[in-house]
Amino acid sequence: MALQLNDSNFQSEVIDSSVPVLVDFWAEWCGPCKMIGPVIDQVSSELAGQAKVGKVNVDEARDLAVKYNVRSIPLLLFFKNGEVKDQIVGASVTKDQLKAKLLALD
């Protein structure tokens, strides 16, 4: 299961992480977000120990959404060493593509 990220744990879980992190910016009312949600959770469990996967509900963490310029969701940001290295907008991506992109950040 993906980590639930918010303003209070984003720094420690994402920015300070020693492994790559995939962050899914989503909302309850977003259809494509709900479609990709289970895929995000699968990536999280399959890459446990190699990478982290977290979700940010943009309605509950507006400051993070603003900080990372979230204009459309789902927005998937790939972090390494506290910096955004890559991104995917939308839900048209496979689990294998997500895993490959995340592991390639090393």
Image (cartoon, rainbow, N blue to C red):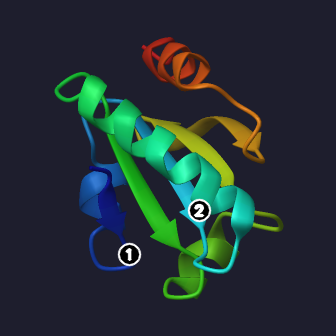
Mark linked to residue 25: 2
Q: Residue furthest left?
A: 49
Mark linked to residue 49: none
Image quadrant occupied by the C terminus: top left
Residue drawn at point x = 32 percent, y = 51 percent:
2
Classed neighbour count for the residue bearing mark 2: other residues with Cα under 10 Å, few (<14), some (14–19), many (≥20): many
Classed neighbour count for the residue bearing mark 1: other residues with Cα under 10 Å, few (<14), some (14–19), many (≥20): some
Which residue is labeled 1 in the image?
Answer: 6
Q: Amino acid at mark 2?
A: Phe
Q: Quadrant of residue 62?
A: bottom right
Residue drawn at point x = 27 percent, y = 42 percent:
17
Q: Give the percent coordinates (x, y) of residue 99.
A: 47, 20
Q: Give the percent coordinates (x, y) of residue 37.
A: 51, 52
**Foreground residue among 102 and 42:** 42
Q: Give the percent coordinates (x, y) of residue 35.
A: 62, 52
- Residue 47 shown left or right of residue 94 in the figure: left
Residue drawn at point x = 30 percent, y = 29 percent:
51
Q: For the residue labelled by badge 2, is the local secondary structure a helix, a strand or a loop?
A: strand
Q: Residue furthest right?
A: 71
Q: Give the percent coordinates (x, y) of residue 8.
A: 29, 79
The span from disc 2 to disc 1 (Cα, nearest Å) is 11 Å
- Residue 106 shown left or right of residue 37 in the figure: left
- Residue 48 shown left or right of residue 60 in the figure: left
Q: For the residue labelled by badge 1, is the local secondary structure a helix, a strand or a loop?
A: loop
Q: Amino acid at mark 1?
A: Asn
Above or below for 90 versus 62: above
